[in-house]
Amino acid sequence: MTFTLATWNINSVRLRAGLVQKLLTEEAPDVLCLQECKSPVDKIPVELFAELGYGHIVARGQKGYNGVAILSRMPLRDAGHIDWCEKGDARHVAAELENGVVIHNCYVPAGGDEPDRTINEKFGHKLDFVAEMRDRFRESLPARSILVGDLNIAPREDDVWSHKALLKVVSHTPIEVEAFEEARAAGGWVDITRQDVPEGQLYSWWSYRAKDWDAADKGRRLDHIWASADIAASGHSSRVLRAVRGWTQPSDHAPVLATFDL
């Protein structure tokens, strides 16, 4: 089975349903994982996606906050979810394909503005979330699995527009990067994007605050596609759809894609 998977923080699936349709029409990934859907599951406009051939969906939702969904042209089995940090947040959902591959769709907390858990509860939550990911991976090594999502950390120096300028900015601080790499290594996960594009600046997020995001190009690679070590060699054709960030009323994230031969 060869399939292409995309991950995209959509920043409201109802507000941007038209953009989801546009992506599904123009790029036609076999599986699309969405984060920050900001919608109860029963309010997701699934009929619009089903009309385009995406009749399978596994999702977890909340009103106006968080939310993750996996849309697919291929049959899916709901493989459950993890309530990270036991907060009841809709930040994870898993689905199993017919070939036994399990897709995990994750939305890691952004962490607020101050990179200090003693004064910023949100940052503490983020660190605890990633630490729990690490511990779970240590307890049960992932196999035939793909983990994608807005992980809200840009780990490498070339994953941000300026390593030096962002060392004290949430998403690229040393403590976050260390936690991120510990979690990835604990599961034996392979960063498929960087397996395919090993060198050079690469971003998937550009702030709404920039007057001209494209010209300023102050981006960060916050969106990731990982594969367990046993299937990582099957991943290829990674790319970030930067142009999507320039669509009308866009998300501040661009979709990230990869293809797998499994």
Image: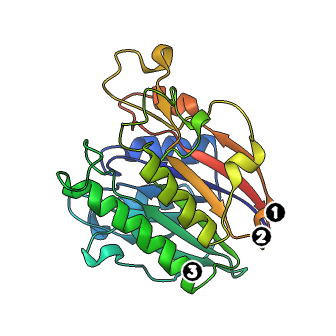
Q: Name the element at disc 2.
A: loop
Cα distance in 3D space between marks 1 and 2: 6 Å
> In the image, 232: left or right of 145?
right
* Mark 1 closeness class: few <14, some 14–19, many ≥20 residues within 10 Å: some
Q: Position of residue 44 (x, y in %)?
A: 33, 61
Residue 116 in view (yes/no): yes
Q: In which quarter of the image is residue 91?
A: bottom left
Marks 1,2: beta carbons within 8 A: yes
User: On the rendered image, what quadrant is the C terminus found in?
Assistant: bottom right
Q: Please give the residue where the numbered disc 1 appears in the rendered image.
A: 234
Most foreground residue, 242 or 125: 125
- Determine which of the numbered discs, if any, sits on residue 43 in the image: none
Q: Name the element at disc 1.
A: helix
Q: Position of residue 77 (x, y in %)?
A: 55, 82
Q: Please give the residue where the numbered disc 2 appears in the rendered image.
A: 231
Q: Name the element at disc 3.
A: helix
User: On the rendered image, what quadrant is the N terminus found in?
Assistant: bottom right
* Amino acid type indicated by mark 3: Arg
Which tag, 3 or 2, sits closer to the chain's start?
3
Q: Please give the residue where the numbered disc 3 appears in the rendered image.
A: 138
> In the image, 146: left or right of 248?
right
Q: How many marks?
A: 3
* Amino acid type indicated by mark 2: Ile
Instruction: Give the residue displayed 77% in from the left and 70% down from the top.
Output: 231
